[in-house]
Image (tube, grey):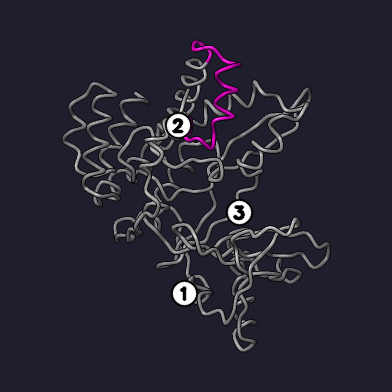
């Protein structure tokens, strides 16, 4: 495992947003991913002012706390509380009387320019988050593929140009690498193993740009130690880049410390074992949801989801990787992914 800075410098800084076609909306409706939401993304854009949000160390988080006119505030808060009930309790409003919106934060960087909603339980001060974003076809495909092929379930809803996502809990990867990786109780071998499996999951389903701040680590105490699960939180770069290495987290400099653990703790035979274990699990998930994922891939092949030069570049690189000229006939990212999945998981 290694990284190449030339490859990473190539990565797109700003990916264009792709529209949700009628065929994708039909898929989302069939699998209960659509809902008539009481608050839309454009409603939240009507904030009157915003202030920088700082963390407990006084550092700028790059989020801004949005403020709204008093005439709109109650309707927005009521609508957001209803959305929380929709994604958590199927819309049962009787269970949300004790909840309130404490803060609405807005992020000006990234592709989806999300709003992060902080919901508080007034009875015990416990809080939770969810996100309201601009709907983008690439991200929706990424969320669906994560839900179907990974060990993680994803909770989200779409309404026109609005995407609502549940919060994915975990320690941000960059913070984990900085603060947790060298703890005495951290099981470095298990971290190395999980990174190999995460690396494989991303490549098999062509999820790009998994730098350390685009995933979280979920730590689960076990009877004799800790278990780790690396979870993607950014799905904007699903099937977009042209270089094969950009779908492998091992090639990002932000992950180099974890890559070094893999190098030092695992030999090639063990790495291959973990890769095959993950492929086997993904194949089982694919087979158990074959009708659903084939429908998704069929819809996905109807739009390019990237620039033509990137599609050609990835087609050439996957053709060389798999030693299959059939990739050169693919005209969309969906077609490339479909063939790539069948080749690896067959």
Q: Secondary structure at mark 2?
A: helix
The picture quadrant where one finds residue 339 is top left
Furthest toward the right, the residue is: 124
Question: What whole-number distance in Å separates the C-alpha atoms at marks 3 and 1?
Answer: 20 Å
- Along the horizontal axis of the image, is 312 left or right of 144? left
Residue in the picture at 61% in, 81% down: 68
Residue 20 image offset from top left, x and y in percent: 34, 60
- Along the horizontal axis of the image, is 296 left or right of 74? left
Q: Nearer the viewer, residue 112 or 32?
A: 112
The residue carrying mark 3 is: 167
The picture quadrant where one finds residue 217 is top right
Question: What whole-number distance in Å separates the C-alpha atoms at marks 1 and 2?
Answer: 37 Å
Please identify, in this view, whether the residue under mark 1 or under mark 2 is nearer the observer.
2
Residue 154 image offset from top left, x and y in percent: 53, 48
Q: Secondary structure at mark 3?
A: loop
The boundaries of the magenta stretch are: 248-270
The residue carrying mark 2 is: 251
Q: Residues within 10 Å of mark 3 (few under 14, many from 20)?
A: some
Residue 42, numbered label: 1
Q: Quadrant of the C terminus?
A: top left
Residue 119 image offset from top left, x and y in percent: 69, 65
Residue 125 image offset from top left, x and y in percent: 81, 63
């Amino acid at each position: 495992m290694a990284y190449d800075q030339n490859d990473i410098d190539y990565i797109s800084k700003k990916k264009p947003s792709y529209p949700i076609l009628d065929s994708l909306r039909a898929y989302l409706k069939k699998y209960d991913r659509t809902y008539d939401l009481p608050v839309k993304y454009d409603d939240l854009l009507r904030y009157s002012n915003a202030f920088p949000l700082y963390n407990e160390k006084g550092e700028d988080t790059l989020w801004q706390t949005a403020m709204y006119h008093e005439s709109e505030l109650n309707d927005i808060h009521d609508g957001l509380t209803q959305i929380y009930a929709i994604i958590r309790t199927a819309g049962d409003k009787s269970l949300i009387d004790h909840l309130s919106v404490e803060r609405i934060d807005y992020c000006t960087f990234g592709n989806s320019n999300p709003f992060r909603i902080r919901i508080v339980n007034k009875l015990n001060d416990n809080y939770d988050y969810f996100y309201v974003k601009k709907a983008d076809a690439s991200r929706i495909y990424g969320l669906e593929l994560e839900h179907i092929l990974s060990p993680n379930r994803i909770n989200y809803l779409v309404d026109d140009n609005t995407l609502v996502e549940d919060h994915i809990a975990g320690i941000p990867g960059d913070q984990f690498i900085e603060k947790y990786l060298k703890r005495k109780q951290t099981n470095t071998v298990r971290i190395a193993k999980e990174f190999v499996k995460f690396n494989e999951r991303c490549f098999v389903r062509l999820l790009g740009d998994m730098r350390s701040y685009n995933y979280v680590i979920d730590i689960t105490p076990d009877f004799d130690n800790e278990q780790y699960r690396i979870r993607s939180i950014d799905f904007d770069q699903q099937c977009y880049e042209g270089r094969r290495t950009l779908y492998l987290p091992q090639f990002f400099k932000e992950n180099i410390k974890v890559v070094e653990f893999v190098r030092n703790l695992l030999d090639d035979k063990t790495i291959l074992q973990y890769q095959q274990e993950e492929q086997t699990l993904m194949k089982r998930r694919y087979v158990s949801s074959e009708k659903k994922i084939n429908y998704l891939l069929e819809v996905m092949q109807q739009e390019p989801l990237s620039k033509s030069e990137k599609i050609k570049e990835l087609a050439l690189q996957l053709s060389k990787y798999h030693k299959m000229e059939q990739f050169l006939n693919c005209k969309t990212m969906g077609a490339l992914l479909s063939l790539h999945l069948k080749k690896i998981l067959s």
